Amino acid sequence: MRVTEQAGSWKLGTRMVHRMGYGAMQLAGPGVFGPPRNRDAAIAVLQAAVTAGVNHIDTSDFYGPHVVNELIRDALSPYPADLALVSKVGARRDDAGNWLPDQSPEALKRQVRENLDRLKIDRLAAVNYRAMGDPEGHGPAEGTIAAQVEAMAELQAEGLIEAIGISTVTPAQIAEARSICDIACVQNQYNLAHRQDDAMIDDLNAAGIAYVPYFPLGGFSPLQSDTLSQVASSLDATPMQVALAWLLQRSPNILLIPGTSSVAHLQENLAAATLQLPEEARIRLDAIGLPANT
């Protein structure tokens, strides 16, 4: 059994994918902008991920921009039949690397086609519409997303995407989206220390909808916790492996897409799929994200 299979699988639209996937964002240059420092190393990471059994890769044409999708194409095409390539739309980059909203229905349709062209495929396994959310952070902001979700449903009807996801959204926006079409996945910020979506995850699990946490290891501000370090030491694991294992054991509908540009770090992340947390460890880790500790 491959390491990735040991965490089990969950439905992503019409597909079953291993719960331990790979996020390709870090393959671009600093700030997710420009080419990688080492193109051969980036190609090697993608190939190692698929060799290890990863069949869910998260990407976007605004990573680079264009750089990451081109790397995926060059490294993996022709693609394995079971590989789910999942992208996201809703933003663009300017010449300085700034992230700018690009959210009209027409823009979303253009971006999906650009992803397809860059990856050299006819259909994406799923596409997440990423609402820009709170301009001061990575959390969602209320507001209708109906026009954007309707545009995604039109793309699905055209056969360009298999499944529709939404990202950086609130429960009300999820309900609105589900009134328009089937939603395969929700992608929000969530990790040991950022637990605002606890109830949402449980509700989505009951509905059979995948939850894909971004910044599972803290993102640009890596998780720092004495408790996490102590638990990791007791289990002869790294803190990041414990943080990933906690997410896998938090709920069966959580799909992980940790990113890295290093084969060694990729292997370390994937090994978290084999790490079983004792009940005492889970209780200690749960306490990290409680209000009194944030």
Image (cartoon, rainbow, N blue to C red):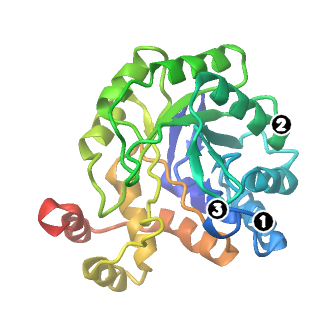
Residue at 65 percent across and 58 percent down: it is 97
Residue type, mark 2 in image: Asp
User: Which residue lies under the disc numbered 2?
Assistant: 117
Of the two numbered discs 2 and 1 on the same chain, state the one appearing first in sequence.
1
Residue type, mark 3 in image: Val
In the rendering, at what x and y percent does residue 101 appear?
55, 40
Label 3, label 1: how far apart the Cα atoms are: 9 Å
Vertical order, 10 against 122 (above or below) = below
Give the label on residue 145, or none.
none
User: Which residue lies under the disc numbered 3?
Assistant: 32
In the rendering, at what x and y percent does residue 261 appear?
67, 70
Residue at 84 percent across and 71 percent down: it is 40
Can see residue 161? no
Task: Please state which of residues 97 and 149 is positioned toward the viewer in this rendering.
Answer: 97
Residue type, mark 1 in image: Pro
Give the label on residue 35, or none.
1
Task: Please state which of residues 97 and 204 is positioned toward the viewer in this rendering.
Answer: 97
Query: Is 218 on the left-hand or right-hand side of 126?
Result: left
Residue at 48 percent across and 26 percent down: it is 183
Query: Is 180 on the left-hand or right-hand side of 27?
Result: left
Can see residue 293? yes
In the rendering, at what x and y percent does residue 49 appear?
69, 61
